[in-house]
Amino acid sequence: MTVGTVESPDVIVVGAGAAGLVAAATAASEGATVVLLERGPVAGGTAIHSIGEFWIPNNRHLQACGIADPRAECLRFMAQLSYPDAFQPEHPSLGLADAQYELLTTFYDEAARAVEHLEAIGAMRSRFSPAAYGDALGHPEYHAERADNLVPQGRHLIVDDGDPAFGPRGEAYVHQLVTYLEKHSVDIRVGHRVVEVFSGSDGHVEGVVVEAEEGLMSLRARRAVVFATGGFGHDPAACATYLPAPIDAVAAVSTNTGDFLRIGMSLGAALGNMTNAYLGNAAFELGIGAPRIPQLTHFPFGDSMIWVDCTGNRVVNEKAVFTERAQAHFWWDAERSRHSRRVLIQVFDRTVREHPAARYPMPGADVGDAHVLSAPTWRELAEAVDARLAELVPRTGGIRLEPNFAANLERSVARFDEDARSGVDRDFGRGATAIQTCYEPRLHEGTPNVTMAPFATDGPYYAMIIGAAMFDTAGGPVINSRAEVIDVLGQPIPGLYGAGCCVASPGGRAYWSGGAPIGLALTFGYIAGRNAARG
């Protein structure tokens, strides 16, 4: 193929997801000519499949309600979750490295401005997310119970598309931004994959090489290039190299194969946060052979339901925030020298299995039941689970149930039943926080804890195999507070910006609450677009 040279816009944005759409809109609002390149067949990336929520501290909706979100207190809250091993509450930079602290402060300072800017230019409207649960401020924060979180509700925003009902708004997020881009003559090109970046003799990034249906072409940028191409969740080799344990399902679109990870490295970019991802859980078998899973198991459905490991022992709070709960899979078994909790077993009874309010991945109109096992007794259920694990050996590294699984499972269920009757989970505190209860329909009347109920005294009983999953990775080339990509010597690579899951998350390891990844993507997409347009 020959490489052709085409026109030179002011700014090239690579990736039309949550960050790239905002970067393009912001650059266009600054008067720059913009070309937006998307590898996939449509604009939207993973954002179009998401709830579309964005976590924005000190936003104008909070301010309109007279709710303060003080900077110092919010930064302490964020920093402790982002960098818990370094956090020092009385330190001038909270114990963080200067660059880490600067990125957090930038997020706090710019996030609300980014949303306000999008509204001011007519690109995207927002409201509290969601206006449900009998409270206009929406659902509680994931860490609402923490004493250092002064705003337990109201940082979650969602696109206002005129529909007050609760529901996903990812499509609306994409639609409103794309509509703005089209009205302002932004050239959106789908099916265009950037495979290379070229620079001038002074090291300034001047353009990209694009692979498209018509062949290879080079596209120059008069001012800057912004990357927002998603993480490396669909690159098995990169995941095996950088992530701390196997993750067996990915919700990101299949084009998120780490394009900017490789391009950034070729330019000498520093890498950061490579061992972290936006984690969750999923039904293990539903991810087999799927290019992407449609959603993660955010808050597992059911009260007479527990998760056990392959010894039959309960090992985690099943209703804990999904990003924290998923860490259970990464536990290192020193005796067996492996991640023996790579898979967990969800067990439940017929009340949970047959309830009409059951949610994914429970079987329903859109979900089959081949991943659900059943048996009349616990021992027979254990045999069925082990037989299924035998079939999955090539995918799990040989994990099987331990010989005492059935006996331990019966003991685990008996202990859970006692706690369900008292309403207090002695082992993991299930149902003790607001976020653990707000998504729970009551399945059994009279239980003191809505998240717990004793199991039925007779079968059938059910099980499904649960694995670690992620929305996408959270590591990549490092950016600074201007969203400039930084090289291994700590200097900005001139003319190169990044935002979203393709760069090292400015939030470190944290998932502060619902919409944190999109909040970061939106904010640093805005910063990248603004600075790229200004050259």
Image (cartoon, rainbow, N blue to C red):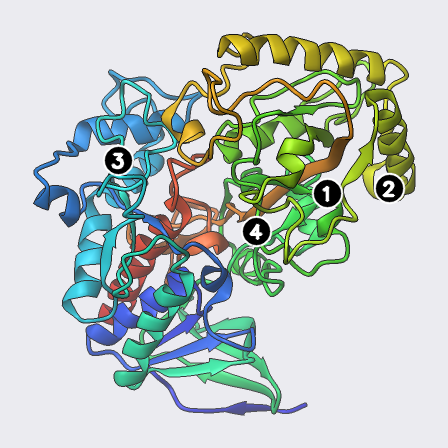
Q: Secondary structure at mark 3?
A: loop
- Residue for badge 4: 295
Name which of mark 3 and mark 2 comes first in the sequence. 3
Q: Amino acid at mark 3?
A: Gln
Separation (CA) of disc 1 from disc 3? 33 Å
Q: Name the residue beneath numbered marker 2.
A: 392
Q: Are marks 4 and 1 in contact (CB under 8 Å)?
A: no
Q: Residue at x 52, y 46 (%)?
A: 475
User: Is 410 above or below relative to 355?
Assistant: above
Residue where numbered disc 1 is placed: 284
Q: Are marks 1 and 2 in contact (CB under 8 Å)?
A: yes
Q: Secondary structure at mark 4?
A: loop
Residue 436 horizontal side relative to residue 456, left or right:
left
Q: CA distance from mark 3 to mark 2?
A: 42 Å
Neighbours of disc 1 within 10 Å: few (<14), some (14-19), many (20+): many
Marks 1 and 2, how far apart at CA = 10 Å
Q: Residue at x 22, y 64 (%)?
A: 118
Residue drawn at (56%, 22%) of the image? 317
Mark 4: give few (<14), some (14-19) or many (20+) Cα within 10 Å: many
Determine which residue is flagged by label 3.
153
Image quarter hosting the N terminus: bottom right
